[in-house]
Amino acid sequence: MTSPNHDSANNAPLRKIDCHVHLVGDGSSGSDCWFSLPTLWKKFLGRMMIKGVGLPVSSLKDELDDLYAHNLVKNIQDSGLDAAVVLAQDIPYSDSGEKMPDAAQFYVPNAYVAALGEKHPEIIPACSIHPGRPDAMDELEKCIEAKMPVLKLLPNCLNIDYTDKKHIPFWERMAEADMILLTHTGGEMTVKVYDPSFGDPNKLELLLDCGVTAIAAHSAGRSALFDDDWTEDLLEMFTRHPNLYADNSALSSINRARTLKHILPDDVQERVIHGSDYPVPVSGLGPMLSGKLSWKDYRSCAKIPNIIERDYQLKRGIGFKDETFTKMDELLKKAGLEAT
Ligand SMILES: [Zn+2]
Protein backbone atom coordinates (compact mmCIF):
# COMPACT_ATOMS: atom_id res chain seq x y z
CA MET A 1 0.00 0.00 0.00
CA THR A 2 1.20 3.51 -0.76
CA SER A 3 1.35 5.75 2.27
CA PRO A 4 -0.01 9.31 1.85
CA ASN A 5 3.54 10.62 2.29
CA HIS A 6 4.78 8.82 -0.78
CA ASP A 7 4.56 9.87 -4.36
CA SER A 8 2.30 7.26 -5.89
CA ALA A 9 4.01 7.44 -9.32
CA ASN A 10 7.42 6.15 -8.29
CA ASN A 11 6.92 5.47 -4.59
CA ALA A 12 9.81 7.82 -3.70
CA PRO A 13 9.27 9.52 -0.35
CA LEU A 14 7.92 13.01 -0.71
CA ARG A 15 10.26 15.75 0.54
CA LYS A 16 9.32 17.81 3.56
CA ILE A 17 9.37 21.39 2.29
CA ASP A 18 9.10 24.86 3.81
CA CYS A 19 7.18 26.66 1.03
CA HIS A 20 7.83 30.25 2.15
CA VAL A 21 11.43 31.37 2.79
CA HIS A 22 12.72 34.86 1.99
CA LEU A 23 16.11 35.70 0.65
CA VAL A 24 17.70 39.08 1.39
CA GLY A 25 20.91 40.56 0.06
CA ASP A 26 22.93 43.75 -0.36
CA GLY A 27 24.36 43.13 -3.83
CA SER A 28 27.87 42.51 -2.40
CA SER A 29 28.31 39.32 -4.47
CA GLY A 30 27.13 41.03 -7.66
CA SER A 31 23.57 39.74 -7.16
CA ASP A 32 21.88 43.18 -7.68
CA CYS A 33 19.87 42.59 -4.47
CA TRP A 34 19.17 45.61 -2.29
CA PHE A 35 17.20 46.48 0.81
CA SER A 36 16.37 49.63 2.74
CA LEU A 37 15.50 50.13 6.40
CA PRO A 38 14.28 53.74 6.30
CA THR A 39 12.73 54.10 9.75
CA LEU A 40 13.87 53.26 13.27
CA TRP A 41 11.15 50.61 13.50
CA LYS A 42 12.32 48.96 10.23
CA LYS A 43 15.94 49.10 11.45
CA PHE A 44 14.87 47.40 14.68
CA LEU A 45 12.97 44.70 12.72
CA GLY A 46 15.92 44.18 10.36
CA ARG A 47 18.37 43.72 13.24
CA MET A 48 15.99 41.41 15.09
CA MET A 49 15.53 39.22 12.01
CA ILE A 50 19.23 39.00 11.16
CA LYS A 51 20.02 37.97 14.73
CA GLY A 52 17.09 35.55 14.64
CA VAL A 53 18.54 33.62 11.69
CA GLY A 54 21.86 33.29 13.54
CA LEU A 55 23.94 36.07 11.94
CA PRO A 56 25.64 39.05 13.63
CA VAL A 57 23.98 42.46 13.15
CA SER A 58 27.17 43.61 11.37
CA SER A 59 26.19 41.39 8.39
CA LEU A 60 23.61 44.05 7.47
CA LYS A 61 26.57 46.33 6.65
CA ASP A 62 28.94 43.94 4.87
CA GLU A 63 28.89 40.83 2.65
CA LEU A 64 25.23 40.16 3.37
CA ASP A 65 24.63 38.25 0.09
CA ASP A 66 26.98 35.36 0.86
CA LEU A 67 26.54 35.36 4.63
CA TYR A 68 22.75 35.18 4.36
CA ALA A 69 22.70 32.56 1.58
CA HIS A 70 25.26 30.24 3.22
CA ASN A 71 23.55 30.53 6.57
CA LEU A 72 20.16 29.78 4.98
CA VAL A 73 21.45 26.64 3.25
CA LYS A 74 22.99 25.49 6.53
CA ASN A 75 19.76 26.13 8.43
CA ILE A 76 17.78 24.06 5.90
CA GLN A 77 20.37 21.25 6.00
CA ASP A 78 20.43 21.22 9.82
CA SER A 79 16.63 21.07 10.06
CA GLY A 80 14.28 18.11 9.86
CA LEU A 81 13.07 19.39 6.48
CA ASP A 82 14.52 18.43 3.11
CA ALA A 83 14.16 21.65 1.12
CA ALA A 84 12.71 25.16 1.05
CA VAL A 85 11.04 27.32 -1.58
CA VAL A 86 13.29 30.40 -1.61
CA LEU A 87 11.73 33.59 -2.92
CA ALA A 88 12.78 36.31 -5.32
CA GLN A 89 11.16 39.72 -4.79
CA ASP A 90 10.13 42.09 -7.60
CA ILE A 91 9.53 45.82 -7.12
CA PRO A 92 6.18 47.65 -7.45
CA TYR A 93 5.09 49.02 -10.83
CA SER A 94 2.54 51.79 -11.49
CA ASP A 95 -0.73 51.08 -13.34
CA SER A 96 0.95 52.36 -16.50
CA GLY A 97 3.92 50.01 -16.09
CA GLU A 98 6.59 52.32 -14.63
CA LYS A 99 8.98 51.07 -11.94
CA MET A 100 8.29 52.43 -8.44
CA PRO A 101 11.50 51.52 -6.55
CA ASP A 102 10.79 54.14 -3.87
CA ALA A 103 7.68 52.19 -2.88
CA ALA A 104 9.77 49.03 -2.37
CA GLN A 105 11.73 47.90 0.63
CA PHE A 106 13.82 45.13 -0.86
CA TYR A 107 14.62 43.54 -4.18
CA VAL A 108 15.85 40.05 -5.01
CA PRO A 109 16.31 39.32 -8.74
CA ASN A 110 15.09 36.09 -10.32
CA ALA A 111 18.48 35.21 -11.83
CA TYR A 112 20.14 35.27 -8.39
CA VAL A 113 17.58 32.87 -6.90
CA ALA A 114 17.78 30.60 -9.97
CA ALA A 115 21.58 30.42 -9.61
CA LEU A 116 21.31 29.50 -5.92
CA GLY A 117 18.77 26.82 -6.82
CA GLU A 118 21.18 25.33 -9.32
CA LYS A 119 23.95 25.21 -6.75
CA HIS A 120 22.00 23.89 -3.78
CA PRO A 121 19.51 21.00 -4.05
CA GLU A 122 17.84 22.20 -0.83
CA ILE A 123 16.75 25.41 -2.57
CA ILE A 124 13.64 25.33 -4.76
CA PRO A 125 13.88 28.66 -6.58
CA ALA A 126 10.78 30.88 -6.80
CA CYS A 127 10.72 33.84 -9.18
CA SER A 128 8.80 37.09 -8.71
CA ILE A 129 7.39 39.01 -11.70
CA HIS A 130 4.94 41.91 -11.55
CA PRO A 131 2.45 40.90 -14.28
CA GLY A 132 2.03 44.56 -15.32
CA ARG A 133 5.71 45.29 -16.01
CA PRO A 134 6.43 45.85 -19.71
CA ASP A 135 8.68 42.77 -20.03
CA ALA A 136 6.50 40.50 -17.86
CA MET A 137 5.90 37.83 -20.53
CA ASP A 138 9.60 37.68 -21.53
CA GLU A 139 10.70 37.40 -17.91
CA LEU A 140 8.11 34.68 -17.34
CA GLU A 141 9.54 32.69 -20.27
CA LYS A 142 13.06 33.07 -18.82
CA CYS A 143 11.90 31.75 -15.45
CA ILE A 144 10.05 28.81 -17.05
CA GLU A 145 13.22 28.05 -19.01
CA ALA A 146 15.25 28.25 -15.76
CA LYS A 147 12.85 25.68 -14.24
CA MET A 148 11.61 27.93 -11.46
CA PRO A 149 8.44 26.07 -10.43
CA VAL A 150 6.92 28.76 -8.19
CA LEU A 151 6.17 32.48 -8.64
CA LYS A 152 5.86 34.66 -5.53
CA LEU A 153 3.91 37.92 -5.36
CA LEU A 154 2.88 40.37 -2.65
CA PRO A 155 0.00 42.11 -4.51
CA ASN A 156 -0.68 44.56 -1.67
CA CYS A 157 2.96 45.74 -1.61
CA LEU A 158 3.74 45.52 -5.35
CA ASN A 159 0.53 47.28 -6.55
CA ILE A 160 -1.00 44.30 -8.37
CA ASP A 161 -4.74 44.17 -8.93
CA TYR A 162 -5.43 40.50 -9.66
CA THR A 163 -8.88 41.37 -11.06
CA ASP A 164 -7.36 43.41 -13.91
CA LYS A 165 -8.20 41.56 -17.14
CA LYS A 166 -5.02 42.75 -18.87
CA HIS A 167 -3.11 40.15 -16.80
CA ILE A 168 -5.05 37.19 -18.28
CA PRO A 169 -2.35 36.16 -20.83
CA PHE A 170 0.20 36.10 -17.99
CA TRP A 171 -1.99 33.79 -15.86
CA GLU A 172 -2.78 31.59 -18.85
CA ARG A 173 0.93 31.12 -19.63
CA MET A 174 1.63 30.32 -15.96
CA ALA A 175 -1.16 27.73 -15.96
CA GLU A 176 0.10 26.22 -19.21
CA ALA A 177 3.61 25.91 -17.74
CA ASP A 178 2.23 24.49 -14.46
CA MET A 179 3.91 27.27 -12.48
CA ILE A 180 2.47 27.58 -8.98
CA LEU A 181 1.59 31.02 -7.58
CA LEU A 182 2.47 31.71 -3.95
CA THR A 183 0.67 34.93 -3.14
CA HIS A 184 0.46 37.03 -0.03
CA THR A 185 -3.09 37.26 1.30
CA GLY A 186 -4.39 39.12 4.35
CA GLY A 187 -2.68 41.89 6.33
CA GLU A 188 1.01 42.74 6.35
CA MET A 189 3.24 44.40 8.95
CA THR A 190 6.84 43.70 7.90
CA VAL A 191 6.93 45.15 4.37
CA LYS A 192 5.60 48.53 3.18
CA VAL A 193 1.98 48.16 1.95
CA TYR A 194 0.80 50.02 -1.16
CA ASP A 195 -2.89 48.98 -1.19
CA PRO A 196 -4.20 46.68 1.60
CA SER A 197 -7.32 45.75 -0.41
CA PHE A 198 -5.09 43.81 -2.86
CA GLY A 199 -4.57 41.23 -0.07
CA ASP A 200 -8.19 40.09 -0.42
CA PRO A 201 -8.24 36.40 -1.58
CA ASN A 202 -11.54 37.01 -3.43
CA LYS A 203 -9.38 38.83 -6.00
CA LEU A 204 -7.77 35.47 -6.90
CA GLU A 205 -10.93 34.24 -8.68
CA LEU A 206 -9.81 35.38 -12.15
CA LEU A 207 -6.41 33.68 -12.09
CA LEU A 208 -7.87 30.54 -10.50
CA ASP A 209 -10.38 30.41 -13.36
CA CYS A 210 -7.44 30.73 -15.78
CA GLY A 211 -6.19 27.42 -14.28
CA VAL A 212 -3.34 28.69 -12.06
CA THR A 213 -2.66 26.66 -8.90
CA ALA A 214 -2.43 29.24 -6.10
CA ILE A 215 -1.27 29.12 -2.49
CA ALA A 216 -2.73 31.86 -0.29
CA ALA A 217 0.09 32.78 2.09
CA HIS A 218 -0.80 33.31 5.77
CA SER A 219 -4.24 31.79 5.06
CA ALA A 220 -5.55 35.33 4.40
CA GLY A 221 -5.55 36.23 8.10
CA ARG A 222 -4.94 39.47 9.93
CA SER A 223 -1.46 40.67 10.84
CA ALA A 224 -2.19 43.91 12.75
CA LEU A 225 -5.19 44.06 15.06
CA PHE A 226 -7.36 46.17 12.75
CA ASP A 227 -6.53 44.46 9.44
CA ASP A 228 -9.30 42.87 7.42
CA ASP A 229 -9.61 39.14 8.10
CA TRP A 230 -10.43 37.10 5.01
CA THR A 231 -9.75 33.54 6.26
CA GLU A 232 -13.44 32.55 6.24
CA ASP A 233 -13.71 33.83 2.62
CA LEU A 234 -10.71 31.69 1.72
CA LEU A 235 -12.26 28.56 3.26
CA GLU A 236 -15.44 29.18 1.31
CA MET A 237 -13.37 29.55 -1.88
CA PHE A 238 -11.83 26.09 -1.25
CA THR A 239 -15.22 24.54 -1.98
CA ARG A 240 -15.28 26.12 -5.45
CA HIS A 241 -11.59 25.94 -6.44
CA PRO A 242 -9.71 22.62 -6.20
CA ASN A 243 -6.57 24.48 -7.38
CA LEU A 244 -6.50 26.74 -4.30
CA TYR A 245 -4.34 26.07 -1.21
CA ALA A 246 -3.19 28.04 1.83
CA ASP A 247 0.10 28.22 3.69
CA ASN A 248 0.52 28.49 7.45
CA SER A 249 3.52 30.81 7.26
CA ALA A 250 4.14 33.21 10.16
CA LEU A 251 1.18 31.77 12.07
CA SER A 252 3.43 30.80 15.01
CA SER A 253 3.98 34.53 15.62
CA ILE A 254 2.05 36.47 18.24
CA ASN A 255 0.23 38.74 15.78
CA ARG A 256 -0.99 35.96 13.46
CA ALA A 257 -1.77 33.07 15.85
CA ARG A 258 -5.48 33.96 15.82
CA THR A 259 -5.71 32.47 12.30
CA LEU A 260 -4.73 28.98 13.51
CA LYS A 261 -8.16 27.97 14.82
CA HIS A 262 -9.67 28.37 11.34
CA ILE A 263 -7.22 26.09 9.54
CA LEU A 264 -6.65 23.27 12.04
CA PRO A 265 -9.83 21.24 11.32
CA ASP A 266 -9.01 18.03 9.36
CA ASP A 267 -10.88 18.95 6.18
CA VAL A 268 -9.16 22.36 6.00
CA GLN A 269 -5.69 20.87 6.65
CA GLU A 270 -6.05 18.97 3.39
CA ARG A 271 -5.43 22.33 1.69
CA VAL A 272 -2.73 23.60 4.08
CA ILE A 273 0.96 23.70 3.13
CA HIS A 274 3.78 24.20 5.63
CA GLY A 275 5.68 27.50 5.44
CA SER A 276 7.67 29.58 7.92
CA ASP A 277 8.08 33.09 6.38
CA TYR A 278 11.78 32.95 7.39
CA PRO A 279 13.37 35.28 8.59
CA VAL A 280 10.19 36.51 10.34
CA PRO A 281 10.70 35.65 14.04
CA VAL A 282 8.70 32.79 15.53
CA SER A 283 8.47 32.16 19.24
CA GLY A 284 5.29 30.12 19.64
CA LEU A 285 4.08 32.56 22.30
CA GLY A 286 0.89 33.42 20.36
CA PRO A 287 -0.14 29.75 19.84
CA MET A 288 0.70 28.95 23.48
CA LEU A 289 -1.36 31.88 24.85
CA SER A 290 -4.30 30.95 22.61
CA GLY A 291 -4.24 27.34 23.85
CA LYS A 292 -3.01 25.83 20.58
CA LEU A 293 0.42 24.79 21.93
CA SER A 294 1.29 23.14 25.22
CA TRP A 295 3.60 24.88 27.70
CA LYS A 296 5.98 21.91 27.40
CA ASP A 297 6.20 22.17 23.59
CA TYR A 298 6.52 25.95 23.84
CA ARG A 299 9.48 25.60 26.22
CA SER A 300 11.24 22.91 24.20
CA CYS A 301 10.79 24.81 20.89
CA ALA A 302 12.16 28.01 22.48
CA LYS A 303 15.48 26.21 22.95
CA ILE A 304 15.88 25.49 19.20
CA PRO A 305 18.17 28.18 17.72
CA ASN A 306 17.56 27.32 14.03
CA ILE A 307 14.25 29.06 13.19
CA ILE A 308 13.49 26.76 10.23
CA GLU A 309 13.61 23.80 12.62
CA ARG A 310 11.86 25.75 15.42
CA ASP A 311 8.95 26.65 13.15
CA TYR A 312 8.74 23.01 11.95
CA GLN A 313 8.57 21.73 15.54
CA LEU A 314 6.09 24.45 16.56
CA LYS A 315 3.78 23.48 13.70
CA ARG A 316 3.95 19.82 14.75
CA GLY A 317 3.21 20.80 18.36
CA ILE A 318 0.26 22.93 17.23
CA GLY A 319 -1.21 19.90 15.45
CA PHE A 320 -0.39 20.24 11.77
CA LYS A 321 -0.32 16.81 10.19
CA ASP A 322 2.59 15.14 8.37
CA GLU A 323 0.84 15.75 5.03
CA THR A 324 1.11 19.54 5.45
CA PHE A 325 4.92 19.21 5.31
CA THR A 326 4.95 17.08 2.14
CA LYS A 327 2.05 18.67 0.25
CA MET A 328 4.31 21.20 -1.51
CA ASP A 329 6.34 18.35 -3.00
CA GLU A 330 3.11 16.67 -4.04
CA LEU A 331 2.10 19.84 -5.95
CA LEU A 332 5.56 20.17 -7.52
CA LYS A 333 5.55 16.56 -8.67
CA LYS A 334 2.07 17.00 -10.12
CA ALA A 335 3.22 20.15 -11.95
CA GLY A 336 6.37 18.51 -13.31
CA LEU A 337 8.30 21.82 -13.22
CA GLU A 338 10.62 20.68 -10.48
CA ALA A 339 14.00 22.28 -10.21
CA THR A 340 15.70 19.16 -8.88
ZN1 LIG B 1 6.62 36.27 3.38
Image (cartoon, helix red, strand yellow):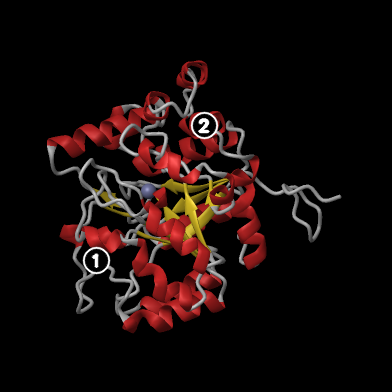
Find numbered disc 1 in the image and state the secondary structure of the residue it sits on: loop
Residue 207 is situated, as x and y percent measured from the top left of the image, at 43, 74
Q: Nearer the viewer, residue 1 or 155?
A: 1
Query: Which mark identifies residue 74?
Result: none
Tell me if I can see residue 151 in this picture: no
| Residue sitting farthest toward the left | 39
At 22% across and 58% down in the image, what residue appears? 196
Q: Nearer the viewer, residue 322 or 306?
A: 322
Q: Amino acid at mark 1?
A: Asn
- Numbered disc in front, either 2 or 1: 2
Q: Amino acid at mark 2?
A: Ile
Judging by the rendered image, the residue that carries numbered circle 1 is 159
Left or right of 137 on screen, residue 62? left
Residue 33 is situated, as x and y percent measured from the top left of the image, at 32, 53
Judging by the rendered image, the residue that carries numbered circle 2 is 318
Find numbered disc 2 in the image and state the secondary structure of the residue it sits on: helix
Left or right of 56 on screen, residue 41? left
Tell me if I can see residue 144 in this picture: yes
At 27% across and 31% down in the image, what residue appears? 47
Mark 1, other Cα within 10 Å: few <14 / some 14–19 / many ≥20 = many
Q: Is residue 19 above or below residue 195?
A: above
Residue 65 is situated, as x and y percent measured from the top left of the image, at 38, 44
Q: Is residue 287 above or below residue 331?
A: above
Q: Is residue 323 above or below residue 129?
A: above
